[in-house]
């Protein structure tokens, strides 16, 4: 137990120095022997500390000649996936999920309408229009990425992170519990996304927010269609620990 606590403290010390910029991303923090000398811990404690840093995606071990520990930066996708797993394990409800998406993505659309560059808006609109010719899994993947692009357009990295996590959870729920939309329904969804982009292009914050709401409410219907169908069965909810 003491070794574990010491490993966590050692990992925390290294992490703070990486975040402070002492070691730029991609640079070597040091070899195992150098780190043992610097932090004055046992080899077992140091290796556990490095494992903790790898789990946090803030550093990774480089093996072989000239190896050591390299400073890294967590990706938005990896952090979003961790958030998505947390939400799934806590059995987030469809309506709670969609309410959060309406609020967050509506706010992203409004801010994009207010401040995004014309070039960035055109890219979003072109992306939505490209989806009109797609179908099946390709279309669903393309559609999910539209919302990530929209969040990035708003210019807030926190919104981008949370949006990506919510999209990840939504995709999993639709696959397991909902009803997959038909190709004609997918096309109708992309038409709504084109309208979102057009209202952003028109700099109409209220209309852009409203189009986002209409789109998400349409998606919400597919979940409820699946949950309420006579043939579909909702998986048993996991028992939470008291």
Image (cartoon, rainbow, N blue to C red):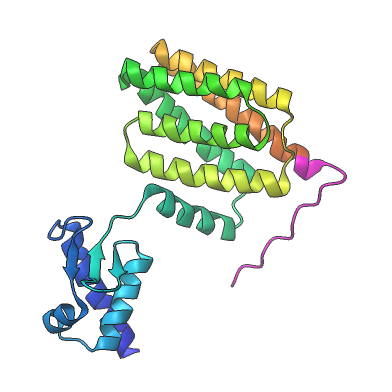
Residue 25 in which image quadrant: bottom left
Q: Position of 147 compared to 59: left or right?
A: right
* Residue 211 in view here: no
Which percent across, then down, holds residue 14?
A: 20, 69
Which percent across, then down, holds residue 58?
A: 29, 62
* Residue 71 in view here: yes
The single residue placed furthest to the top in the displayed view is 202
Q: Magenta-highlighted stretch: main secondary structure?
A: loop
Which percent across, then down, holds residue 122?
A: 40, 17
Q: Position of 53 compared to 162: left or right?
A: left
Residues drawn in magenta: 226-242
- The C terminus: image quadrant: bottom right
Q: In this view of the protein, which residue sits in the foreground, 5 or 187?
A: 187
Taking the magenta stretch, the answer to whether it contains residue 232 is yes
Residue 31 in which image quadrant: bottom left
Q: Residue at x 31, y 19 (%)?
A: 117
Q: Is residue 168 above or below residue 143?
A: below
Q: In this view of the protein, which residue sits in the foreground, 8 or 31?
A: 31
Q: Residue at x 21, y 79 (%)?
A: 32
Q: In this view of the protein, which residue sits in the foreground, 185 or 95?
A: 185
The single residue placed furthest to the front in the displayed view is 65
Number of marks in the image? Answer: 0
Q: Position of 30 compared to 139: left or right?
A: left
Q: Residue at x 23, y 57 (%)?
A: 26
Q: Residue at x 53, y 25 (%)?
A: 212
Taking the magenta stretch, the answer to whether it contains residue 156 is no
Q: In this view of the protein, which residue sits in the foreground, 154 or 32?
A: 32
- The N terminus: image quadrant: bottom left
Q: Is residue 137 above or below residue 117?
A: below
Which percent across, then down, holds residue 199?
A: 46, 14
């Amino acid at each position: 137990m003491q070794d574990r606590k010491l490993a966590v403290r050692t990992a925390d010390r290294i992490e703070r120095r990486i975040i402070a910029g002492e070691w730029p991303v991609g640079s070597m923090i040091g070899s195992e022997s150098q780190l043992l000398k610097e932090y004055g811990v046992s080899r077992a404690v140091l290796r556990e500390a490095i494992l903790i840093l790898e789990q946090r995606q803030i550093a990774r071990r480089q093996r072989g000649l000239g190896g050591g520990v390299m400073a890294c930066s967590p990706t938005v996708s990896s952090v979003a996936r961790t958030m998505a797993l947390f939400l799934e394990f806590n059995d987030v409800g469809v309506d709670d999920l969609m309410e959060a998406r309406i609020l967050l993505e509506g706010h992203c659309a409004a801010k994009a309408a207010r401040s995004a560059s014309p070039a960035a808006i055109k890219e979003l609109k072109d992306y939505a229009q490209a989806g009109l010719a797609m179908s099946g899994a390709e279309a669903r993947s393309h559609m999910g990425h539209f919302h990530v692009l929209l969040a990035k357009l708003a210019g807030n990295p926190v919104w981008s992170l949370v949006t990506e996590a919510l999209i990840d959870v939504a995709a999993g729920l639709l696959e397991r519990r909902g009803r997959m939309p038909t190709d004609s329904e997918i096309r109708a969804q992309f038409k709504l996304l084109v309208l979102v982009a057009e209202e952003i292009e028109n700099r109409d914050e209220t209309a852009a927010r409203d189009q986002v709401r209409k789109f998400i409410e349409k998606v919400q219907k597919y979940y409820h269609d699946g949950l309420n169908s006579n043939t579909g069965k909702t998986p048993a909810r996991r028992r939470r620990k008291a």
